Image (spheres, grey):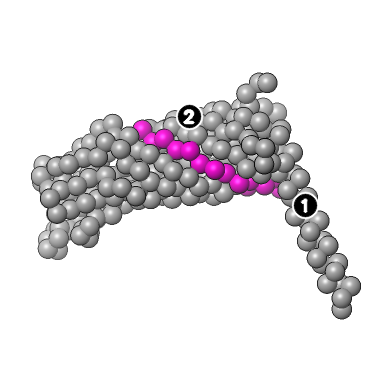
Amino acid sequence: MREPARGVRAATAATVIALLATAQISAQERGTIIGGVAGYSATSLQWRPAVEGAAVGGIMVGAFAEASTPVGWLSVLAEGAYTRRGGDIERDLEGRDVNGRVRADYLSIAVHARAAVSIGRARLHMSAGPTVDQLLRRRMDAATAAILPRETPSVFGVSVGLGAGARVTTRVFAEVEARLFEGLSRAHAGDFLTVRNRSFEVVTRIGVPLRR
């Protein structure tokens, strides 16, 4: 029984080495990628104390750059995008039906570490890192603005995501990523209320390598 077990271990080790080698070659071939990003963000407001509401969708559009590192499977992504976040309010603290709305436009700046592996023509990756939302504009109905008079110019958060991509042509890369953004600092506040953003995002990136 020992020989089959050794064979399984050897095969597993060979597979891991092959995947890491493939990732190393893939990163070297890609170098630095620049391009555009666009997507959709569904945001739910996290109230304290809790208020019942509904998620609201918004667009994302911007640009990115991804740089390889000496570690073949690791790269760094820098992204800047216009992002719309917000939420609807359906019931107040006392459970009464209301019709409130919060909308905010941000310049979202993200720097994420990405671990990737290539399998055939596909490239799978996992990403994580900080995201800072710089407030551009905020809109509320009068009643909501009265209880949330204070806005936050910069909102700090973290994002984690999973994605897949492939080479479309000899120079063009495309990928899709699904990720979760969790705001760690408050986005809106009142005398006895604070609100954070939580968003589920799906983005598409199209990029080309920088010429060396």
* Residue 110 seen in render: yes
Crowd band around label 2 with a 10 angstrom C-alpha radius: few (<14), some (14–19), many (20+): some
Q: CA distance from mark 1 to mark 2?
A: 34 Å
Quarter assignment of residue 109 = top left
Depth check: 176 or 157 in front?
Answer: 157
Q: Is residue 110 magenta?
A: yes
Q: Residue 70: percent from the left, percent from the top?
A: 67, 37
- Which range of residues does the magenta coloring cover? 106-124
Check residue 17 in the rendering and tell me which mark sits there, or answer none. 1
Mark in the foreground, 1 or 2? 1
Quadrant housing the C terminus: top right
Q: Residue 177: percent from the left, percent from the top?
A: 52, 45
Q: Is residue 86 left or right of residue 83?
A: left
Which residue is disc 2 drawn over? 63
Q: Secondary structure at mark 1?
A: helix
Q: Is residue 157 above or below residue 79?
A: below
Q: Is residue 74 left or right of residue 42?
A: right
Q: Secondary structure at mark 2?
A: strand
Q: Is residue 193 above or below residue 151?
A: below
Depth check: 169 or 13 in front?
Answer: 13
Crowd band around label 1 with a 10 angstrom C-alpha radius: few (<14), some (14–19), many (20+): few
Quarter assignment of residue 113 = top right
Which residue of the protein is positioned furthest toward the right in this rendering? 3
Question: Looking at the picture, which amino acid does disc 1 mark?
Answer: Ile
Depth check: 55 or 132 in front?
Answer: 132
